Each structure stands twice: as structure tokens, then as C-alpha cells.
């Protein structure tokens, strides 16, 4: 753990920077390349803790991952997957995307992780694999063991994916390699983060896989067949980019970041949220600039399509000119930590008035003061502390290295932008 005091700028934050590649797209790119019918080259991949653990997980299953240049890797799938020992860390993408690959290996693969990993739900994903003919020991939480037989029969599975869209993506990504493909049905409350499932479907289509969703996004079908090798450039992580754009919103500055013209991420929802909170958004061909007045506008924000913004938006609302709320994010109670409880505790300790609702938070600004900010081993909680520190001097994060999950050098990038 590395303590860190969030910098508080003396004036408006103005500048530009490039953020690393999307964790979500990098993870899917690695998995699909590992399942492909030949080697693939991925450019712009994120180099952070989660993606390093993904590389190690795939390597333990026999996948060859070779660095060609900074941010450029060659992924060569094995002739057959080999059973291994997987360290998930605290990464949902590993504990939910890799088990289906382990089921294609011939032998047992054990999944373990950080102490906090046992609190992250995996049972619906593992139950789905069980329905498709895969035996899993201790399928309620990490650690668990997948007993692969070299093939997955496939067919129909019915799961409750209301806690995470990754349960759906984890099955869809490998489904073309199942003998009978997959017909997956969701039974439960609304599936969160639908843009992430659309990202999965788009990346499957790019590799020639026949995959579709029902009109109401509660059922999906993947036909059996090869997954084509594909060289691909990974998009920048737009949620991470929004964290830096928030610095302009709070301080009355202007920050510019590269922004893809066409994207499978929730671009409109992210930019719409920044605009609703008082930012002026200027979207060009390949960049976005957000300018602020120095006053954050309190608003009722629906983050159903961009729940990863919850922590940063909560920090912004604590700095706003009036009370606001966040809704559509009840499932983030099951992310790296219970984010709603963590935000209520940390923002409350700093002077904001915060209350949990069934699917979000209500936040009223208060007399904010500096002091300790616990990160809970959660990169988004660390981002929220950094944003709060833009306007509140002396916000002391207990561990800035929690950010290495998705940005290897967040502290340096943040300090350089804010200090400039």
C-alpha cells in the first residue's frame, strides 16, 4: 500500500493527455485471440495489473503471448489448452472470462485470487458452465476448480446475470468453441452494463462468429464454429479518460483526450453525464475537450449504461452546487468492493451527506474537509479520492497503487496534469 495525498491545484486545470487502452476491450481481445484459429496481433493493449494477470492466466493454459513493441503483443493460441493454476487477483474479467477456456483444457484448473476476490460473485457463470456439461468444484466463489475434459458440449443455459454482465460475456466469448454452440437465457432482474455485452457481440462479429441477442436483451445465441484470428487496435479506456476530464469540470479548466469516432464503449452516456454535471463538451473527429466553469451542477444521473463512472460522479456530486443522485447502479455493490457502501462511508467522513438507495445514492454537498480516504483496493475509489482532492485540500488516499488495476502510472499522470 502506498499512501498519497491528492494534489489540489491553485487554478484551472488545462492540458491534454493520452490514456491507456480499454481494460474491457483488452481483456476481450486477449481471450478471443487465445481462442482464435491462428495468431493475432493486438495494438494499444492496456498494461496494468488486471491485464498482466490475464496474460499470465492465458500463458498457464498454453497460450503464447509475445511483446513486439510497447503496447503491441502477438497472441498465439495453443493446439490444445493445458490445465493450469490461475491467479485472478481481484479481476472480474479473469474469474469470469477464463473459466470457459479452462473447460476446454483436459484436466483441472484452479482459480484463486486476492483475499477480497471471494466476495465477488461468480456462481451464475459457473452454474451456466455446469449446465453446459462442465464440472466445477466449489462453484460459489473464488477459489474454485474447473475440471476440463478437452471439450464443452454446449447447448442451452439459463442464468441470473443481474449482478454482472460479465456472466453473459464470459459464456459468449468462448461459446463458438462449444460443440453445440450456446443458447443463453437470462432469468432475473435487469442485466447491468448492456454496452459491455454489445462490445462482446461486436468483437465476436469482427472475428466471423455468428452471434445475436434477443430484442429485449435477455437471451443470446452463438453458433458453433471457428473464431478467426484478427489483428486489432484497442480503443482508449473512456471511463479512465472521463476521470481526467473531470479535472476540468471541477476547476474551471479545459482538458483534451483522444476519443474514438466510432466505439463499442458507452461514449454517449459518458459524455452526456459530464454535460449534465455542468461540463461543456466539444467532440471533434478524434478528440474530446471538456471545459468547466469551476461549478459542478447537481443533477439526477442515470448511470445504467456507464456504471463504472459511479465513484467519480459521486465525488463530483459531493462538490456540486446542489444535491444530486445516482441511479441504475445497484450492482456495483458487487464490484471490487461494495462501492455504494464505500462511497457513503468515505464521502460522509469528509463532510458530504450521502445515503444509499436501492439502486444508487443520494448526495448533498456539505462542509468538506481533508483527511483519510480509504480505497478498499478499488481503482475507482482511488479515482474518486483524486477528484475530490481537486477542490478539497488534504485528501489522503491510503493506497494510490489501487489504480494500477487499470492505469499503471495514474499517480504520475494525474499529478502532471493537475500540477501543470
Image (cartoon, rainbow, N blue to C red):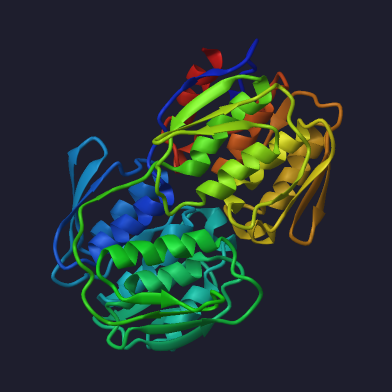
Q: How many marks?
A: 0
What residue is at 25 percent from the left and 65 percent from the top? 207
- Residue farthest toward the top in the current orientation of the protein: 10
Please tell me in which quadrant of the rendered image residue 194 appears.
Answer: bottom right
Q: Position of residue 31 (x, y in %)?
A: 31, 61
Of the pair 74 and 290, the residue shown nearer to us: 290
- 275 in relation to 94, above or below: above
Residue 55, image x, y percentages? 29, 52
Closest to the observer: 111 or 102? 102
Question: Where 107 falls versus 38 (above or below)?
Answer: below
| Residue at image coords 16%, 66% | 78
Camera-nearest residue between 246 and 103: 246
x, y percentage for residue 219? 50, 80
Q: Relative to residue 196, is residue 42 depicted above or below?
A: above
Relative to 357, is 97 on the left or the right? left
Snapshot quadrant of residue 347? top right
Tell me, yes or no, if residue 354 can be seen here. Answer: yes
Identified at 64% across, 58% down, the residue is: 304
Q: Is residue 112 among what the camera can see?
A: no
Residue at the (45%, 33%) spot, across then down: 284
Query: Picture coordinates of residue 27 (x, y %)?
Result: 37, 55
Work out whether 98 lies above or below 303.
below
Q: Is residue 359 left or right of residue 247?
A: right
**Left or right: 334, with 74 as reference point:** right
Asked whether, in this view, residue 70 is left or right of residue 23, the answer is left
Amino acid at each position: 500500500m502506498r499512501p498519497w495525498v491528492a494534489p489540489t491545484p491553485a487554478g484551472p486545470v488545462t492540458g491534454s493527455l493520452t490514456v491507456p487502452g480499454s481494460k474491457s476491450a483488452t481483456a476481450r481481445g486477449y481471450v478471443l485471440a487465445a481462442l482464435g484459429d491462428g495468431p493475432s496481433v493486438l495494438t494499444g493493449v492496456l498494461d496494468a495489473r488486471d491485464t498482466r494477470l490475464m496474460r499470465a492466466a492465458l500463458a498457464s493454459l498454453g497460450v503464447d503471448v509475445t511483446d513486439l513493441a510497447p503496447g503491441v503483443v502477438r497472441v498465439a493460441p495453443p493446439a490444445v489448452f493445458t490445465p493450469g493454476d490461475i491467479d485472478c487477483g481481484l479481476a472480474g474479467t479473469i474469474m469470469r472470462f477464463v473459466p470457459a477456456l479452462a473447460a476446454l483444457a483436459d484436466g483441472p484448473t484452479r482459480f484463486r485470487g486476492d483475499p477480497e476476490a471471494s466476495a465477488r460473485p461468480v456462481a451464475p457463470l459457473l452454474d451456466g458452465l455446469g449446465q453446459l456439461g462442465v464440472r466445477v468444484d466449489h462453484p460459489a466463489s473464488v477459489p474454485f476448480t474447473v475440471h476440463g475434459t478437452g471439450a464443452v458440449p454446449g447447448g442451452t443455459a439459463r442464468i441470473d446475470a443481474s449482478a454482472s454482465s460479465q456472466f453473459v460475456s464470459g459464456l459468449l466469448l468462448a461459446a463458438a468453441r462449444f460443440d453445440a454452440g450456446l443458447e443463453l437465457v437470462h432469468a432475473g432482474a435487469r442485466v447491468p452494463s448492456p454496452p459491455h455485452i454489445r462490445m462482446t457481440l461486436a468483437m465476436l462479429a469482427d472475428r466471423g462468429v455468428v452471434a445475436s441477442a434477443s430484442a429485449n436483451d435477455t437471451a443470446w445465441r452463438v453458433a458453433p464454429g471457428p473464431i478467426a484470428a484478427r489483428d486489432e487496435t484497442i480503443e482508449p479506456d473512456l471511463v479512465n479518460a472521463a476521470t481526467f476530464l473531470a479535472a476540468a469540470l471541477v476547476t474551471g479548466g479545459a482538458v483534451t483526450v483522444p476519443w474514438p469516432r466510432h466505439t463499442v464503449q458507452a461514449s454517449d452516456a459518458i459524455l452526456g453525464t459530464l454535460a449534465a454535471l455542468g461540463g461543456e463538451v466539444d467532440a471533434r473527429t478524434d478528440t474530446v475537450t471538456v471545459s468547466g466553469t469551476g461549478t459542478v451542477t447537481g443533477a439526477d444521473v442515470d448511470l445504467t449504461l456507464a456504471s463504472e463512472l459511479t465513484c467519480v460522479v459521486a465525488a463530483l456530486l459531493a462538490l456540486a452546487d446542489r444535491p444530486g443522485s445516482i441511479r441504475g447502479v445497484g450492482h456495483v455493490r458487487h464490484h471490487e468492493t461494495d462501492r455504494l457502501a464505500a462511497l457513503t462511508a468515505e464521502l460522509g467522513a469528509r463532510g458530504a451527506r450521502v445515503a444509499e438507495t436501492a439502486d444508487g445514492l443520494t448526495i448533498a454537498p456539505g462542509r468538506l474537509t481533508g483527511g483519510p480516504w480509504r480505497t478498499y483496493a478499488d481503482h475507482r475509489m482511488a479515482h474518486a479520492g483524486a477528484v475530490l482532492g481537486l477542490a478539497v485540500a488534504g485528501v489522503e488516499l491510503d493506497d494510490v497503487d489501487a489504480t494500477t488495476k487499470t492505469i499503471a502510472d495514474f499517480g504520475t499522470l494525474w499529478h502532471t496534469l493537475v500540477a501543470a
